[in-house]
Image (tube, rainbow, N blue to C red):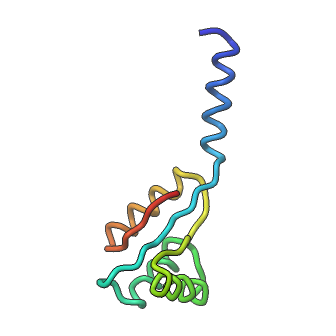
Amino acid sequence: MNTETLKKIISQEKDENQQQYHLVLFNDDVNTFEHVIDLLIKYCNQDAIQAEQCATLVHFKGRCSVKKGVYKDLSSIAEILAVNGLTVEIN
């Protein structure tokens, strides 16, 4: 592998680690507002008002972006939310 190819690979990895993604929460008929709000506060570092607003948007619009960040960070949060019964996706 030549030096230019190695530089391109390193640059691509750096871009992937810095690219911003959205953690999207979807509405369901199972979880209570209280449960969703508690999880958003605990794992998405939202304050109570922001978490309540997100839960309301999810309820009425069907989905809401609840956190923005690099994929690696969001994937661990998504896994925790999913284990706790929420339906999430990273875009």
- Rendered view: 34 above or below 21: below
Instruction: Give whichever of 91, 1 is nearer the camera.
Output: 91
Residue at the extreme front: 61
Q: Residue at x 52, y 64 (%)?
A: 23
Q: Position of residue 49 (x, y in %)?
A: 60, 90
Residue at the extreme left: 30
- The image quadrant of residue 62 is bottom left
26 left or right of 20 in image: left
Q: Residue at x 52, y 50 (%)?
A: 72
Q: Residue at x 66, y 40 (%)?
A: 15
- Quarter of the picture containing the N terminus is top right
- Rendered view: 35 above or below 69: below
Q: Where is residue 79 in the image (x, y as percent from the top left)?
A: 38, 61
Q: Where is residue 74 in the image (x, y as percent from the top left)?
A: 51, 58
- Rendered view: 33 above or below 17: below
Q: Where is residue 68 in the image (x, y as percent from the top left)?
A: 61, 63
Q: Which residue is drawn at 60% across and 34% down?
A: 13
